[in-house]
Amino acid sequence: MYKISVILPVYNVEKYLEECINSVIHQTIGFENIQLIIVDDCSTDNSFAIAQKYSNEYENCIAIHLDKKSGSAGKPRNEGINVATGKYLMFSDPDDFFNLSAFEKMYNEIEEKNADFIIANWNYTDEDGTIWEKPVFDNNRFHNFKLSVHDYGDSFYIMNSSMCNKIFRRDFIMEKNIRCLEYVPGEDTYFSMCAFLESKNVYYIDDIVYYYRQRNKTDSLSISYNCSYEFFKGMNVAYRALYDKFVEKDEVQFYRFVYARNMTYLLYRFVDSTLLTDDERIDILGEMRWFYKLSKTLKVPAVQKSLGTLIDKIVAGEYKDVIDICNIIAEIRSFMPRDMKQKMSKPYNEMYEEMLKHEF
């Protein structure tokens, strides 16, 4: 049995794919201990040919080509899970890459703690792979600890949606039948949160194991970057499934904080999108009205006053007014630097502290 099976969904990433694969091959744990499963989602460039090259060279590398394009990473990841034989599962996006000691550190931690899964620190890089100065999780604040679904402070901050900075015990994933949503974006959030809700032992380590590349939007073919009509329709499906799962597990109090983050993220994606017609915007707002009504039900305030106005008008069904306000906010944000826009899109600490005072 391999120590780790790493699953790599692929779609039109020939520019980055070999760097990602090589960051798996050259792991300090030894590539002979790793099963690499590359699942191609009907790429139209040379991505699958690259995957086949490595599959022909290494017997522990499997290249799978889907018969029909799925349009999101959920289906390829599920295909990979179904054929994986390693004791543990790890995941990557094909345009990112691992720290070369990532697998060894993650394997040792999950073995030592007998955990269901381990979460590690990670970092962003520029398009050219230049690593950002500060990691995602502040090392001055967050140190190794055990997470709890009843901890709305540190555990909430660390329990991010990505599958790529984590290692999962495969028996746990199979026993609980945890899978990604298919054919919609947000599949990683659903998978990670389902794992968290089903788990008994989850730990965080502050080692940086993964590097997430910030690609130029004009170069990206990912549906997550497109913010198209299909993207928002898919996110509606994903967010409904996620909410239903938290309700089923009677953990709505933790969901409030997940919701606060997701609501802000989605609103600014909606504001910034240049791919939607007014009719499409109205249709999306109508379908997602249930989601924004939760802000009142769950007592989750908006990050900024302007977003609060948007939410009030969405709930009231005043969609044309919403579009007008979105246009104004988008114009202002078009002049902002990237880091300022990102900061605006994240709920602030004081907001979470205020939410703790008013339990649902």
Image: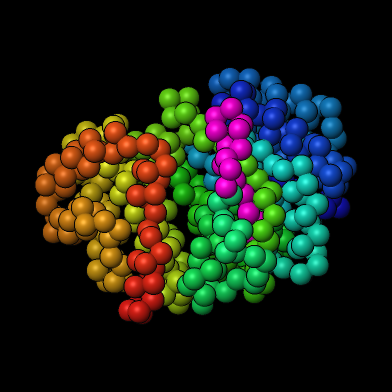
Relative to the observer, which residue lies in front, 58 or 258?
258
Q: Residue at x 57, y 47 (%)?
A: 134
The structure residue drawn at horizontal position 13% and vertical position 59%, both measured from the top left corner, is 316
* Foreground of the two, 353 or 74: 353
Residue 276 found in image quarter: top left
Q: Residue shown at 81%/67% (left/top)?
A: 112
Residue 109 as seen in the image, left or right of residue 47: right
- Whether residue 212 is situated above or below residue 308 in the rendered picture: above
User: x and y percent of residue 46 in the render?
Assistant: 63, 20
Q: Is residue 129 magenta?
A: yes
Colour theme:
rainbow
- Height in image: 184 above or below 299? above
Position of residue 7 measured from the top left corner of the image (x, y, whole percent): 68, 44
Instruction: Provide the residue span drawn in magenta.
Output: 119-134
Q: Is residue 334 left or right of residue 238?
A: left
Question: Does the magenta portion include 74?
Answer: no
